[in-house]
Amino acid sequence: MPAALPAFAPEATARAAATGSVVRRRLRLTADDGFHLAADLFQGAAPARATVLIASAMGVPRRLYAGLAETLAAAGLTTLTLDYRGIGESRPPSLRRLRARLSDWAELDLAAAVRELRGRHPELPLLWLGHSVGGQLLGLLPDAPVHAALLIGSQSGHWRHWPGSRRWLMASLWWLAIPALVAARGYLPLSALGQGEDVPAGVARQWASWGRARDYIGSYARTRKATGFEHFRGRLRAIAISDDQFAPRPAVEALLALYRGAAVELASLSPHQVGLRQLGHFGFFRPRFRATLWADARDWLLSTLTPAT
């Protein structure tokens, strides 16, 4: 049976939260296995030029991306955010009883989000904005009709991509910490570590198994057919943040190498470029960057809709 979700009204009767010219509608998506997923759809007043799917980071609820989604929607990019199964409003009453894998977040949850956007706007290009694991999971979608993708802090998680002593910390995470914590608690308690929301056991175990493999998520992708790693041919821009300890530049480059058919570009971003001493893995999504980093993201996504001359 599909896991129960916190009750909220269907779209036809849901309260629409308006911010300026943008309306946010709460949705409930149904994945192919019957699991219900909480999502938000952001629509601007002007006719839409494209749709955008924001794919969240590990253990991060969709609310982190609401401000960015509003910025994109105001520019004619109808944007959808969702909570993966086990996260945010897609978390059932018992996380310990939830059977889920990290690959389910791509092949079932994000696939349902793609289907929702394509069903609403089949005539519009579909754009992808992935944060961390959200940029990895694009590569697992079978034949995803994605026009272009912008990845923020997305990386291969194999421990050898980290510099100095941090590589041994990453190795201990994959080999020791995650297996031990999941065995003890029945899920990965990221909230207790101050790193997001708790993650289902099966998601955490598969994540750790990828981190122990030399090509990380590529080890799983080889077992699947028609994945995005092989078949995505659009423009792909990745942003590597200089003080992002979760996604150092070599790890970002290793993920990009898996997207063999994409037109890849790698951009560097440092805190001093935006007047800060620290930016890190989550700083890009602070509301203070609405007129700078968010505007740059919006403009790049819009630029992919115009044929190169």
Image (cartoon, grey):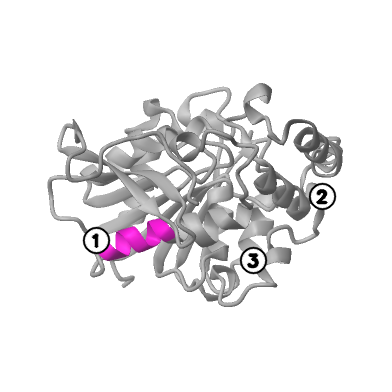
- Rounded to the nearest angstrom, the CA distance separating label 1 from label 3 is 30 Å
Horizontal and vertical percent position of residue 115: 36, 63
Q: Which residue occupies 73% across, 57% down?
A: 216
Dividing the picture into quarters, in which one does residue 185 lie? top right
Mark 1 belongs to which amino acid?
Answer: Arg
Horizontal and vertical percent position of residue 81: 38, 45
Residue matched to label 1:
120
Q: Earlier in the sequence, mark 3 or mark 2?
A: 2
Residue matched to label 2:
160
Dividing the picture into quarters, in which one does residue 66 lie? top left
Task: Say which mark, if any, is on residue 22.
Answer: none
Horizontal and vertical percent position of residue 189: 67, 30
Q: Which residue occupies 22% across, 47% down?
A: 75
- Rounded to the nearest angstrom, the CA distance separating label 1 from label 2 is 42 Å
From the viewer's perspective, is residue 299 above or below residue 245? below
Q: Which residue occupies 68% across, 24% down?
A: 193
Q: Give the magenta-colored segment's residue range.
A: 112-120
Mark 3 belongs to which amino acid?
Answer: Leu
